[in-house]
Amino acid sequence: MTIEGSQTILDNQTATYRLSYKPAGNIVWSVTSNMQIISGQGTDAIVVKGIGSDRGSITASMTHVFEGRSVTTRATRGVTVGIPDENLIDVTIGGQSSNYTLFVYHSGRNDCRANYRGTGGNNSILEYEWEANGFEVFNAQTSNNSVVYLRATSTSIGSPTTISLRARNNVGWSSKRLIGANVNSSSGYSILTSSDGIITIEPNEGREYSLLRPTERTLSGSMPYEVYNSYTGVQVANGAVSREGSTINLSHLPTGIYVFSLRVSDDLRQTLQISIRH
C-alpha cells in the first residue's frame, strides 16, 4: 500500500493524505511532531495540519489477517512542513562564528559557510542566497551555495556592512537572516610616492600578499601597473612589479598630476593620484 498526497505543507495549512492499494483491515495513522491529524483517523484518508518548519513524515499502519496470521503493514510518506526557519541557520565566516570580518583585499579569507540545524541539515536545503553590501558571491564550493566566498566590488566599502542570507527548501524561501560584519580595508600594499616621480611599493603586514588565493593572482605572479595623465586620460607608462615589493621610477614624466593604478589581483586594484614636480 502507498500514501498519496503532497510532499509539502505550509505552516498552519492543511492537506489530505489517502491510502491506496490497501488490504482490508484496521488503519492507524501517525504523524511527526510538526504535523497534527485534524480528522480521518481510522479511515483510509486523513486531513493533516502543518505546524512550524521541518522535515517530517506520515505513517499508516494496517493490521490484517493473512493466511491465518495477524500481519501489520506500514506505509510512510516524507513531508516537508513550512519554509526553512532562518533562526536555524548557523553561519561561519573565515572560520569565525561571531565577530565577523570581511576583507576587501583578501577575499581568500572571506569563506562563508551556512549550516541548517533543522531535520535533514543542509541536505534539506535546495539553495542558499548570500548578499552583502559592497561584496559579491564568487567561487561557490557546493551546489546549494552552503559554502561560498565573498569578494569586494569596491575598494572603498564602509564598515560595518550587512550580510543577508536566506535558504530555500521544496516549500519555498525562508525569511532573510541579517548578519553584521566589520570590513577590513587594509590594502595589500603600501604605495609611497615622492614629488620627483619615485614610487615605492611594499607589502603590508610583512608578507600579507601571500594570503591571496592562487586563483586571484595574475598569471605571471607579478602585479601590472598603469599610469595615466589625470587631465587627458592617456596612458603614459605601464609595467609590472614583484609581489615582494619594488620601486618604480617615473622621473622621466613631465611635471603634472597622474593616476597610478596597481592591479593587486585579477579583481582588485589600488589606485591613487600622484603629483610629479621638477
Image: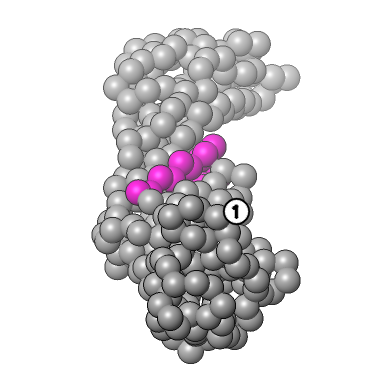
- The picture quadrant where one finds residue 19 is top right
- Whether residue 148 appears in this view of the structure is no
What residue is shown at x 37% (from left), y 35% (from top)? 174
Left or right of 165: which side holds 250?
Answer: right
Q: What residue type is labelled 1?
A: Asn
Residue placed most toward the observer, 198 or 147: 198
Residue 171 rendering spot, x and y as whole percentages: 45, 26
Q: In which quarter of the image is the N terminus?
A: top right
Residue 81 rendering spot, x and y as whole percentages: 41, 29
Mark 1 sits on what residue?
139
Left or right of 142: which side holds 42?
Answer: left
What residue is shown at x 54% (from left), y 47% (from top)? 145
Residue placed most toward the observer, 64 or 54: 54
Q: Does the magenta stretch include residue 126?
A: yes
- The picture quadrant where one finds residue 72 is top right
Residue 226 rendering spot, x and y as whole percentages: 57, 65
What residue is shown at x 50% (from left), y 29% (from top)? 170
Q: Does the magenta stretch include residue 152?
A: no
Q: Residues within 10 Å of mark 1 (few under 14, many from 20)?
A: few
Q: Give the range drawn in magenta.
A: 118-133
